């Protein structure tokens, strides 16, 4: 059963839309000082409901990991894409995020009739799209996309931590924690640090 929260939000957004596949899109990694920004797009299957979908930030890592596998198995289709550190530094983080979102939508096996994007900005797409503020807490497909993006990026951080253990990426996931800032001052920046972000730029001077 869908929760009333999801039902009301989806009905309000879709009441004037013709029937068709709807994709939810969200990103992870806009704020960190290192690593790619990741986006995901998900088209859910109404015949295979997934319990427990919610904004990824409200879920435990274990719950996110389990839902990640369930979404990949039960969704009609899904896609995960990213924009690199080089693209973030060249374009700026907002434009790189829009690029990652566009890549995620373009990577879907099925073409959606409508795309719902978390937040208040839309990437350039060749299908109709709507921005949904706090969509990751209101729209099931956006919740699913937020989980895919978050888990994928967190796993990237854990893998990269093995290459550069001195920075502690597995713990802080690239965010500017006291531990991370101290490591930056001590070791300088690594290849995956975002040179256009203030704390990184300071150590590169």
Image (cartoon, helix red, strand yellow):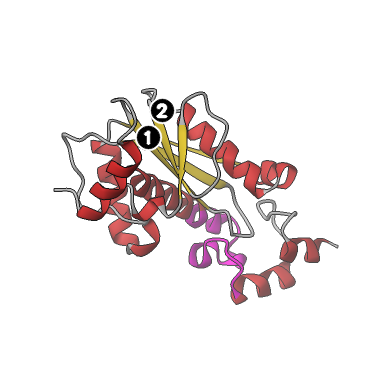
Classify residue 90 by image quadrant.
Answer: top right
Residue denoted by label 2: 108
Q: Position of residue 19 (x, y in %)?
A: 28, 25
Image position of 36 (left or right of 149): right
Residue denoted by label 1: 23
Residue 14 part of the magenta segment: no
Image position of 23 (left or right of 8): right
Q: Residue at x 65, y 49 (%)?
A: 93
Q: Position of residue 59 (x, y in %)?
A: 33, 62
Mark toward the viewer: 2 or 1 = 1
What is the residue that sits farthest to the left in this orientation?
A: 1
What is the residue that sits farthest to the front in this orientation?
A: 16
Q: Position of residue 68 (x, y in %)?
A: 32, 47
Instruction: State whether residue 70 appears in this view.
Output: yes
Label 2 crowd bin: few (<14), some (14–19), many (20+), radius 10 Å: some
Q: Are marks 2 and 1 in contact (CB under 8 Å)?
A: yes
Q: Quadrant of the C terminus?
A: bottom right
Q: Residue at x 49, y 50 (%)?
A: 119
Image position of 193 (left or right of 201): left
Highlighted magenta segment, given as a residue range: 157-177
Helix, strand or loop at label 2? It is loop
Classify residue 76 by image quadrant.
Answer: top left
What is the residue that sits farthest to the right in this orientation?
A: 205
Image position of 119 (left or right of 184): left
């Amino acid at each position: 059963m869908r929760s009333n929260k999801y039902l009301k939000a989806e009905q309000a957004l879709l009441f004037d839309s013709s029937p068709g596949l709807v994709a939810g899109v969200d990103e992870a990694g806009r704020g960190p000082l290192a690593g790619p920004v990741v986006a995901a797009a998900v088209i859910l299957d109404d015949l295979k409901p997934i319990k427990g979908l919610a904004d990824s930030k409200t879920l435990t890592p274990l719950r996110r990991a389990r839902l990640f596998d369930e979404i990949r198995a039960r969704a009609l289709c899904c896609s995960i894409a990213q924009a690199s550190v080089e693209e973030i530094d060249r374009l700026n983080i907002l434009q790189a995020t829009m690029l990652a979102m566009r890549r995620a939508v373009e990577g879907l096996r099925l073409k959606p009739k409508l795309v719902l994007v978390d937040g208040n900005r839309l990437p350039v797409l060749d299908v109709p799209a709507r921005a949904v503020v706090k969509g990751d807490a209101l729209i099931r497909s956006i919740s699913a996309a937020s989980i895919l993006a978050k888990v994928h990026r967190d796993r990237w951080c854990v893998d990269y931590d093995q290459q550069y253990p001195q920075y502690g990426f597995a713990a802080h996931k690239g965010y500017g924690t006291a531990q991370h800032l101290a490591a930056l001052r001590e070791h300088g920046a690594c290849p995956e640090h975002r040179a256009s972000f203030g704390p990184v730029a300071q150590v590169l001077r």
